Image: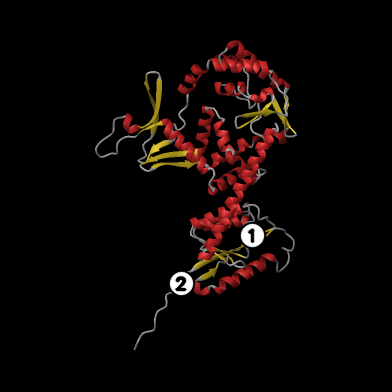
Amino acid sequence: MRGSPITAMPRRQRCAIYTRKSSEEGLDQDFNSLNAQREACEAYIASQKAEGWVALREHYDDGGVSGGTLERPALKQLLSDIEAGLIDVVVVYKIDRLSRSLMDFAKLVEVFERCGVTFVSITQSFNTTTSMGRLTLNILLSFAQFEREVIGERIRDKFAASRKRGMWMGGFVPLGYDVKDRKLVVNESEAELVRHIFERFIRLGSVTMLVRELQAQGRRTKRGKPFDKGIVYKLINNRVYVGEAVHKGESYPGEHQAIVDREIFDKVQAILATNGRPRGAVTRSGTPALLRGLIFTDTGRAMTPTHTRKGSRRYRYYVSTDAIRGRATANRPPPLRLPADMVEGAVVGEIRRLVRMPEIVAQAVTAVRQEAPDIEEAEVIAALARFDEVWSALFPAEQSRIIKLLVERVTITADGLAVDLRTEGMGTIVREMLAPKSEEAAA
């Protein structure tokens, strides 16, 4: 007698139902919108019983909560249970129940994919277990990236047009000015200090001596910090003080009032130009090592900055500690010695690439809004789009500070390098770039 064929039972799929309603209207009824959504989802799950689908008893219901934010109690619990491996499928009535923001939706899908969770919208034939569902997902995420890029381009174009008209478009407010009604207005007490710095530099002819004098007098920057050489160099080169607005190296007549006479400003520039070559040498010799304490080999060995000289030229390197301590052996790869300019340039280039990636942008938005909920998503996107422009305008010391905030670790491998970013550091950088908003609110 032939035996009956044995049918393999499908793997049990634990299905979590998520429901949401934006307003609280009607939630006190015996059968409300959340109940209707859950009932429809349960019916769909029941239709998939042959595939092993089982609805979990836990309720993930957000009543009276907007879909424009991820700060929702039930959603947070859902994500926590997903991370704990308690859920296989997330079922919703419509995609907009999960999120109304494409960027937030992309972040949620990233969590689902990382944890091996399937996402299903029962009324829109959206199921990531099918090839069509995955295609739809990729289309949605592509439009999300397109939306971010269009917003960035539009903001950059508006920024450029406004700067050409001489308008103040944000950034660090220069010493000597305040911002009122989105315009620079002269702060007379600070303006006197600015004029003093210009005049003293003309008499002393040395930034080093001027910094010592300012520090001895207890003078402070707008942010309350002692003056240093980088700050003073930036100040005496700032064309804002002669009433100009600068965009990508081009100067335009500004809407604001000048603080420094053109004649005085030109004298300062002439002194800087005359002493340009020795000043350049000092700047190069004092250039901080951007990656000090951050760069390692793939074997975990730290790399330290060093330099050599050939005649008047100075060559900087990053060298593994094995090389410094003479640890090279036949059983260990040869110690690394890499040109500092090459490595630092590659790291900065990688950072520029990473800050444009959708997932990194999404992480930055989350980090910023956790500390400053009033900052809009579009503002964060615009700030990251300006990263290249801001970086190019920074002095070496400030660039080094930014790298320390942004980079967790740089690992050198046989195939190149890998950069691990600090999400919280990115949030700090973006908040600093958007600092004028908070200063305006406090004015």
Q: Is residue 186 above or below residue 352?
A: above
Percent x, y for residue 74? 61, 57
Residue under the image location 64 percent in, 52 percent down: 69
Q: Is residue 206 above or below residue 85?
A: above
The answer to whether the residue labelled 1 contacts the one labelled 2, judged by CB atoms less than 8 Å apart, is no
Percent x, y for residue 394? 55, 30
Disc 2 designates what residue? 10
Percent x, y for residue 46? 56, 73
Disc 1 secondary structure class: helix
Disc 1 designates what residue? 96
Between residues 91 and 349, which one lies in front from this camera angle?
349
Between residues 203 and 292, which one lies in front from this camera angle?
203
Judge left or right: residue 121 versus residue 286: right
Between residues 124 and 409, which one lies in front from this camera angle?
124
Q: What's the CA distance linking mark 1 and mark 2?
A: 30 Å
Residue type at mark 2?
Pro
User: Which is in the foreground here, disc 1 or disc 2?
Assistant: 1
Q: Which mark is residue 265?
A: none
Figure quadrant of the N terminus: bottom left
Residue under the image location 31 percent in, 29 percent down: 325
Figure quadrant of the C terminus: top right
Crowdedness of circle 1 by 10 Å Cα count: few (<14), some, many (20+)? some
Disc 2 secondary structure class: loop
Residue type at mark 1?
Asp
Percent x, y for residue 67? 65, 56
Can residue 175 be seen in the rendering of this structure? Answer: no
